[in-house]
Structure formats: structure tokens, C-alpha cells
Amino acid sequence: MTDARTLAYINLYGILGTLENLCELDPNARALLTNKKPITIGFDVKGGPKATLTFKNGFCRMEDGLNRKCNIMLPFSSCEKFNGMIDGTVTPIPSKGFQHIGFLLNSFTALTDLLTKYLRPDPADLEDEEFFVTSTTLMFYLISVAIAQIGNNDAIGQFSAGHIPDGTIKMSIKDGPAVGIVVRNHHLITLKKSPEQYRAIMEFGDIHLARDLFDGKVNAIACIGEGTIVMGGMINMIDNVNRILDRVAVYLA
């Protein structure tokens, strides 16, 4: 069972937030952003998350909170309506920025379509190693952000977060991307960079193992026993993050 509000946080900070990484990893994504001046889109979800996306020089940046000076404002009357936009059943209507509607309908839509291609890939596309690495890296960032959003908003996730002491958990793929999940007073924030200091670490042996885990093809406990997933530091931190990770699969199914 999932909660619409938690899903809205995952969809905004996880799905749309991954546009940042898409633009960094794929030159085709950068090529879609032909705007000469920065364009900002504000997402205002009633009873849910609020964030601003800025598109500048072929790159994208997400900021928490609503920038009232944004070029395009997309209001949503409920978390369900916002989630509907993500799954393609709701068409958003801007309350501001109709002069930039071309960017919304063309560049932004093409960018999100490309992201969908990576996050819900055709098995044939994954046979290309470059596509495989980009797709798996984007999934890694999405899942790491979803852990924080579920820990903060989902009732079951909050229970697990309530047992995590303050500190940073490093989650990484060997020779690949790494993030820091920072815990303060049982509130989780995901930083998309390798932390310099951390109290616990969980590292996947390689990117192919990470993909198999994300796709549910291998068992994490078995991998730990085999040594292909390495854990260290405060194991109770990792144990509770893994419980939240089980909820991620439910929300992203």
C-alpha cells in the first residue's frame, strides 16, 4: 500500500530531481535545452512538496521550495493531481508563464520523455553498455532520493527512520556513483555526492550487481553473504535504511 503524498515527494524530488543527473550524463539531454536565457519552473503541490527547476546552459538544477519569481508556475490542487502528471493522466495548466509554453511543451516534455526511456528501459536498450550505465546510474540516484522521502513521509518508513541515529550513511556502487544519506533528528536528506565522512557504508560490488538488485533479480541478503555487497560501520543505520529500501520497491513498482 502506498501513500499519495509520499509518492508526490518521490515524483518531485526523485523523478524530476533526476533531470539534474540526466543533463550531466547524457549530451542528448543537454542538446534539448536550447533556451538562451535561464528558464525556471515552479511546482506547487497543495498539501505536498514544492520545488523549483532551473534550466540554464544545457543543465538543470532543482531547489527545494517555490521561487515565486519563476518563469512558469505549475499549480496542482492535490498530490493525486501531481502524481497524475507524472504518470501521464493529468495535463498541467500553468498559472503563470504562458509565453514560455513552447519550452514546456517541447524541451521539457522531450527531456522527461528521455528520462522515462532511461528509468523504464526497453530490455533491448540495456544491451548497449553506455545506455546501461547511464540508466543504472539514474536509477541509483532516484532510489537514494526515494529512501529519504519515504523515511520522512511514509508511515512505515518513518518508523524505521525513527531508529536511525544522527550521522551520514554512504551508499555507493564500486567505481561508480555515491551518495550520502544524512540523518538529523530522524529526518533524512540525500546528497548526491560522495560524503567525506560517514558512520556507515553500503557498497554494491559493481554496476551490474546494482542493476540486478534494482530489478529484483538477486537477493540482497544473499549478496551480503557472498560479499558482493559490502557493509561497514554502524550496522543498525544500514539495517533501518534497508527496511526503507524495501518500501522504495513498492512505490517505484
Image (cartoon, rainbow, N blue to C red):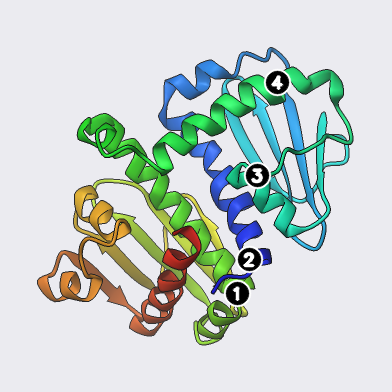
Foreground of the two, 26 or 154: 154
Q: Which of marks 4 and 3 is nearer the N terminus?
A: 3
Look at mark 1 in the image and give the residue it sits on: 154
User: Residue 221, how many percent across, how many down?
Assistant: 22, 76
**Gap between marks 2 and 3 measured at Cα:** 18 Å
**Nearer mark to the viewer, of 4 and 3:** 3
**Gap between marks 4 and 2 measured at Cα:** 28 Å
**Gap between marks 3 and 1 measured at Cα:** 24 Å
Q: What residue type is labelled 3?
A: Thr
Q: Which of marks 1 and 4 is nearer the N terminus?
A: 4
Q: Is mark 4 on a helix, strand or loop?
A: helix
Q: Is residue 228 left or right of residue 161?
A: left
Tell me if label 3 and label 1 are in contact, CB under 8 Å.
no
Tell me if label 4 and label 3 are in contact, CB under 8 Å.
no
- Residue 95's image quarter? top right
Mark on residue 103? Answer: 4
Q: Which amino acid does label 4 sit on?
A: Phe
Look at mark 2 in the image and give the residue it sits on: 6
User: Residue 12, how many percent across, how many down?
Assistant: 64, 50
Near mark 1 (Cα within 10 A), the count class, few <14, some 14-19 or many ≥20, is many
Q: Is residue 224 left or right of residue 145?
A: left
